[in-house]
Image (tube, rainbow, N blue to C red):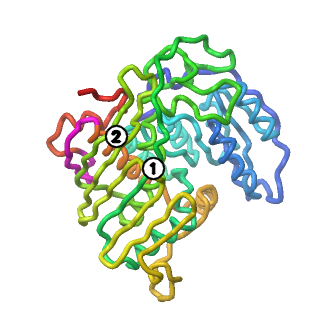
Amino acid sequence: MSLSQTSRRAFLFGTAPMVVPSSVFGMYAPSKRVTIGMIGMGRQAMSVNWKQFEKMPDVEVVAICDVDSWRLSEAAKAIPGSKQYRDFRELLADKSIDGVMISAPDHWHVPMSMAAIQVGKDVSCEKPLTRCIGEGRQLADLAKKYKRVFRTDSEYRTKPNYHQAREAVINGRIGKLLTIRTGVPKGDVGCEAQPDMPVPPELDYERWQGNAPRAPYTLARVHTPHDIKSRPGWMRKLHYCDGMVTNWGTHLNDIAQSGNGTDRTGPVEVEGKGVYPAAESFWNVLLDFEVHYKYANGVQLIYKTDKPGIRFEGTDGWIEADDRGKIEASSPAVLAPASASNWKRLERKTDKQDFVDAVKSRGETMADAEVGHRTTSLCHLGHIAIQLGRKLQWDPAKEIFPGDGEANAYLAKPIHAPRRA
């Protein structure tokens, strides 16, 4: 999909950027630094992503972009000397930028990533990477074609207990893997119908909507004005996000896919059930769900709303890790330090360091566009099965539901509304 094939609404021209010369080079000479442009300066960007880049002596954030001028100005205070843009395409045209960090709402992830790749930028993009399976395939293929470094931004391969768990599984500490159980929190809710409201003067709402269906502005659809700490409303609205099923699911299911050795493929069967808010609710993402997957190697994955964590079960024991940093196993031997010379070690570094190192080396990241696409697709498969209310067969090589036109109709478009009985 080229830029010309993407909805014109998604790429409206904006005002000319405000440019503030960059003057801080740090301990590294300019030729040794990686320069980053950040797109989307909301909660995740400022509370997590920017703070990690700030601590890296060989990285400089040289440009920032947001369609909300208040957020842009607040970010500029924290990142002095950065160039400021309202239109992400103008940031991408900045030749001083090596790579971009995309922290925009979910419906913007693929359009922005593809545009960045096509102009020669390396990309780190927030999870969940995609809104539908088809656009994920386009993105992964484009990154490969243009030979761009890509990092699906999730810190879960960095967390010590999750790293230890998947390394133990891959090295046979629990015998043959049989079952994986992943859980994500029940964090989504419904809400009453919302009134139309005037668009805040600082927000370019037309550009914010991008490829999403046009809808009147209301606060619960976007984010709270003059606030980057609260959870934005768009995360609970199917026009822009799929909710917890892909949001947290792409963290835990990435660990599941990696532990199973399937992070570049997928399952062969899926079925699920879930609960959406009442039909009159403005927010409409899944509230509760349970999805069962079967892989060609016989492994079963059970994914549901529960405490966030993962459990691997095998013929010789089990191991589990959770979001409190805890790790437990069926016996001390499963958790014992590696001693064998043939122990397969998995690389462990932060997501941002992984991205920056790959930008410098031109190597692969631990979770490139293909891995991110496959993990997010796993979540989409569960969501589609819940929508249709029946067991589905999946061909992970061709990425289709064989002979199932009703299910295949969901491959090329996001789910925009719950299916009601």
Estimate the x, y position of residue 277 in percent, counting from the top left.
39, 29
Q: Is residue 399 magenta?
A: yes
Query: Which residue type does callout 2 highlight?
Result: Gly
**Element assignment for label 2:** helix
Which residue is found at the position 46% from the left and 82% from the top? Answer: 343
- Residue position for label 1: 184
The label on residue 165 is: none
Q: Which residues are magenta?
A: 387-400
Q: Which mark is residue 134?
A: 2
Residue in the foreground of this view, choosing between 399 and 360: 399
Q: Judge depth for marks 2 and 1 and give the one in front.
A: 1
Residue 352 in the image: state x and y as whole percent. 62, 55
Q: Kindly identify the residue that appears in the image at 72 percent across and 49 percent down.
A: 51
Q: Nearer the viewer, residue 98 or 276?
A: 276
Q: Amino acid at mark 1?
A: Val
Few, some or many C-alpha atoms within 10 Å of disc 1 (few <14, some 14-19, many ≥20)? many
